[in-house]
Image (cartoon, helix red, strand yellow):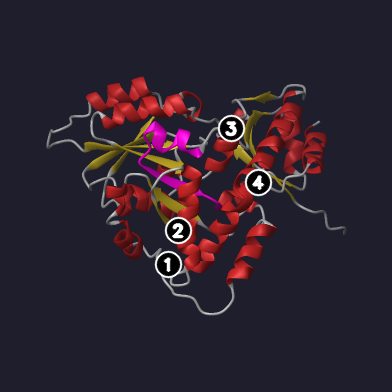
Amino acid sequence: MENVPVVNFASDNAAPVAPQILSAIQKANTGPVLSYGNDLLTKGVEEKLKCIFDCDLRAFPVATGTAANSLGLSALVPPYGAIYCHQLAHIDKDECGAPEFFTGGAKLVPLAGEGGKLKAEELEKVIAGAGGGNVHHVQPAAISLTQATECGTVYRPDEIAEIAIVGHKRHLCVHMDGARFANAVEFLGCAPADITWRAGVDVLSFGATKNGAMGAEAVVFFDMDKAQEFEFRRKRGAHLFSKMRYLSAQLDGYLTDNLWLNLAGHANKMAVRLAEGVSRQNGAEVLYPVEANMIFAKLPEVALECLAVSNILYYRNGRDEDAEVRLVTSWNTSEQDIDHLLKVIA
C-alpha cells in the first residue's frame, strides 16, 4: 500500500523545527560553556530582546508555554489573588491547573468576549464589583491577555492600552500570553513595543515553539521590580536548565535577521490563502476574522466526511453537531498543502 504523506493543519506545534534554529543549536554545541544561564548566548538573547522592544527589560528562557505563563503569573499574583482572562484562554482551558499551582492558589476568573477578546468596559465592571479589600473575596490582582487570541484574532494597541488603564488604576498587573506573539506583530505591522510595554503590559510570555523552535519561550519583564524574585521561582519551578545554552541558542536563532517575523509572516499569508479558499466553498463559513495563523470554519457534512478519511491532520472544534473545524497554518505550510485541503473539502 502506498504511503501517503500527512498534511498538517492540526497545530503549529506539529510542525518541524525551522532549519535556521536547528543550525543555531548545532552551532552552540561546541566546547564547554558556563551553565545555568551564565553563558554568552543567554546574555545575548536578553540584549537582542532589549533592541527588539526598545527598552530595558529582563528575559528568562524556559522550555514551555505553560511554564512561561504560570511562572510569569506567579511573580504577579498572591495566592489569594484573582486573574481575569478570556473564557477560551489557554491558561484556563489547557494548562491543567498549572497557573493555580505555581501562584499557590490564585483564582482564574474567565470572562466572555467576542472573538476571543476581553473588553475594557466589561473588565471595569467586573473588577469594580469583585470585592476588593473584602477579606471574604479573592482580590483582583492581574489581567491576562492572549495575543493572538484563541480565535485567531489580534488585539490592537489601543485595545490593550484601554485594558491596561483599567487594570493599573486598580493596581492590577497585565500579563500577555504571547504564544503567537510573532503572528500578531506581523499582522499589525507595528513595533513589538506598541502592543506590550507602551500599551501597559508588565510581563510577556514570548513564544517561539509554535513558530519554528524546538522548545523555547522567554518570560519578558518590562516591570523590572517584578523580575527580582523570578530567578528563584524559575529554579523552584524546575525550569532553570543547567545546559541553558540550548534553549538560548533557539531564541538567538529565532531573533536573528528577523527570522521570528519572517516565519510568522509566512504562516499568516498561508492562513489568508486558506481562509479565502474555504469561504468560496458552497455551504462553508469562516467564523472569525483571520488575523493570525488560525482559521475556524463551519463546513458542510460531506466536507467533514471527506476530511475524516483524508491524510490531513486537523481538529474538530466544539460539539460534533456544530460542524466546526480549526485549521492552523505554520512556518512550513505550502500552497500545495492548502490546494490539497481545498480539493478534499470540495
Identified by mark 3, the residue type is: Gly
Return the disc, 4 or 3, that comes first in the chain's sequence.
3
Q: Is residue 38 left or right of residue 274?
A: left
Q: Earlier in the sequence, mark 1 or mark 4?
A: 1
Res. 189 mark:
3
Give the residue type at disc 4.
Leu
Q: Nearer the viewer, residue 203 or 14?
A: 203
Front in this rendered view, residue 327 or 182: 182
**Residue occupying the point 40% across, 38% down:** 197
Q: Are marks 2 and 1 in contact (CB under 8 Å)?
A: yes
x and y percentages locating residue 330 in the rendered image: 66, 45
Q: Earlier in the sequence, mark 2 or mark 4?
A: 2
Neighbour tally class for label 1: few under 14, some 14-19, many 20 plus, Cα within 10 Å: many
Cα–Cα gap, marks 4 and 3:
14 Å
Q: Earlier in the sequence, mark 1 or mark 3?
A: 1
Amino acid beneath label 1: Gly
Outermost residue on the right side: it is 1
Q: Which residue is mark 4?
A: 263
